[in-house]
Image (cartoon, rainbow, N blue to C red):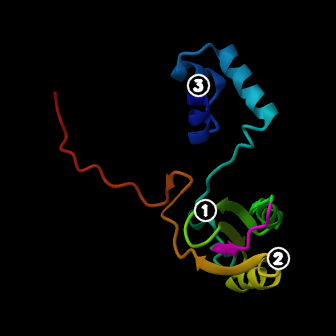
């Protein structure tokens, strides 16, 4: 059954018939499993991964992506969960992870400008109780996201074979 989820994660447009063929399972079983996962919330949503740089015709319509590392003071009984949930509610925040290392949380933030990210950090994020420090890293160029490469495919340098 995990194979069905892995196939959907790679390509959400696969039909139930195609998934059944690829896994060797009956179509009805595939459809039932997917419906169950959708109802339980295991499948959160379906989405497309878009290279906005390749399609955006308005060069003034830019967005800035930043990774923000957050150091927290833990609280008895909740650890970091309550602060992580609070941070996740902000519209600018795309993801929040509890991580190992010198910081506790890593957030992905998307905003219209560097100034907007700066304002988010200084006015919203750093004012949350128990936030001790933040470190912001701005994305300069995306090479790969969500398993999809954003670089042109390499030319096939193999020699042609003739029968």
Apparent side of residue 153 relative to residue 132 in the rendered image (left or right): left
Q: Is residue 69 magenta?
A: yes
Q: Residues within 10 Å of mark 3 (few under 14, many from 20)?
A: many
Q: Earlier in the sequence, mark 2 or mark 3?
A: 3
Look at mark 3 in the image and give the residue it sits on.
Answer: 19
Look at mark 2 in the image and give the residue it sits on.
Answer: 128
**In the image, residue 98 lies at what x, y percent?**
65, 60
Q: Are marks 1 and 3 in contact (CB under 8 Å)?
A: no
User: From mark 1 to mark 3, how far is it between C-alphas?
Assistant: 34 Å
Q: Quadrant location of residue 58?
A: bottom right
Q: Quadrant location of residue 130?
A: bottom right
For the N terminus, give its image quadrant: top right
Residue 36 lies, with reference to residue 137, above or below; the image says above
**In the image, residue 126 lies at what x, y percent?**
77, 81
Q: Is residue 158 visible?
A: yes
Q: Earlier in the sequence, mark 1 or mark 3?
A: 3
- Tell us which disc is closer to us: 1 or 3: 1
Q: Is residue 1 magenta?
A: no
**Picture residue at 67% right of the left edge, 74% below the top:** 71
Apparent side of residue 69 relative to residue 36 in the rendered image (left or right): left
- The foreground one among 150 and 107 is 107
**Picture residue at 70% right of the left edge, 23% below the top:** 33
User: From mark 2 to mark 3, how far is it between C-alphas?
Assistant: 45 Å
Residue 132 lies, with reference to residue 89, above or below; the image says below
**The magenta segment:** 68-76
Look at mark 1 in the image and give the residue it sits on.
Answer: 99
For the C terminus, give its image quadrant: top left
């Amino acid at each position: 059954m995990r194979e069905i989820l892995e196939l959907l994660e790679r390509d959400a447009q696969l039909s139930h018939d195609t998934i059944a063929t690829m896994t060797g399972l009956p179509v009805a079983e595939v459809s039932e499993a997917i419906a169950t996962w959708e109802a339980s919330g295991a499948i959160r949503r379906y989405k497309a991964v878009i290279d906005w740089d390749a399609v955006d015709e308005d060069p003034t319509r830019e967005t800035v992506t930043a990774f923000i590392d957050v150091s927290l003071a833990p609280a008895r009984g909740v650890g970091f969960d309550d602060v992580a949930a609070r941070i996740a509610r902000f519209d600018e925040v795309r993801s929040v992870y509890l991580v190992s290392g010198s910081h506790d949380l890593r957030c992905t933030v998307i905003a219209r400008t560097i100034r907007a990210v700066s304002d988010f950090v200084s006015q919203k994020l750093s004012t949350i109780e128990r936030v001790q420090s933040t470190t912001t890293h701005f994305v300069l160029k995306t090479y790969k996201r969500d398993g999809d490469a954003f670089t042109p495919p390499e030319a096939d340098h193999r020699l042609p074979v003739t029968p």
